[in-house]
Image: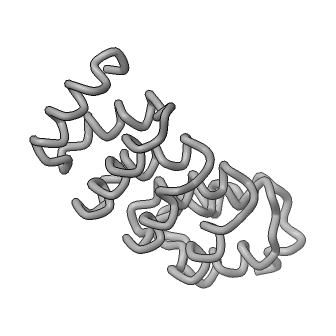
Amino acid sequence: MDLENMDFEDKYDLILDPRTSGDILRELAEIGDREILPHLAEHHNTPEDVLRHLAKDVNVYIRAGVARNTSTPDDVLRDLIKDWDDLVRKDVAENTSSSIKTIITLFEYEKSPKNPSARVILALYQNKNLPYVAKVIIETLFREML
């Protein structure tokens, strides 16, 4: 399969297919098509090493895709907690694979700045893994954001 010479639609179709192998996804990542990478970052078969690399990309939508991916290792999700863009942090909060430790760490990070992100606070509040005591703190400190 000549991935490098495929047009966008064919590459995109591969990424949409849940059966696409990690090897094909790795090849697509190596091609580096900037339009494809945000979608590739979300694919559940994207290899861990590729996700780790994409988590450091300058493009916020690529990092957000990694944050949304339920196959992203928890240590990578914890690194994304300190992302400057609240879209990425919100996606970590919404990721059903985020561990309780990651969710609590994000909660601590988010309540520390003077201007916490309303969408991250809301996503945390709605996360079923957030401990009850943290929900009560959110209700107390950030009632206007809910």
Can see residue 17?
no
Viewer-nearest residue: 46 or 63: 63
Q: Which residue is depicted at the point 46% across and 47% down? A: 91
Left/right placement of residue 75 relative to residue 16 reads: left
Viewer-nearest residue: 128 or 20: 128
Q: Which residue is depicted at the point 25% across and 42% down? A: 127
State which quadrant residue 142 falls in: top left
Left/right placement of residue 62 relative to residue 72 reads: right
Q: Which residue is depicted at the point 82% across and 63% down? A: 33
**Total numbered circles:** 0
Q: Which residue is depicted at the point 49% across and 67% down? A: 79
Locate the C terminus and report the quarter of the image it occupies.
Answer: top left
Position of residue 51 measured from the top left corner of the image (x, y, whole percent): 56, 72
Viewer-nearest residue: 100 or 43: 100
Residue that protrudes farthest toward the top in the picture:
144
State which quadrant residue 125 falls in: top left
Position of residue 124 measured from the top left corner of the image (x, y, whole percent): 31, 40
Locate the N terminus and report the quarter of the image it occupies.
Answer: bottom right
Classify 99 as above or below 108. Answer: below
Residue that protrudes farthest toward the right in the picture:
5
Can see residue 86?
yes
Left/right placement of residue 114 relative to residue 52 reads: left
Report the colour scheme.
one colour
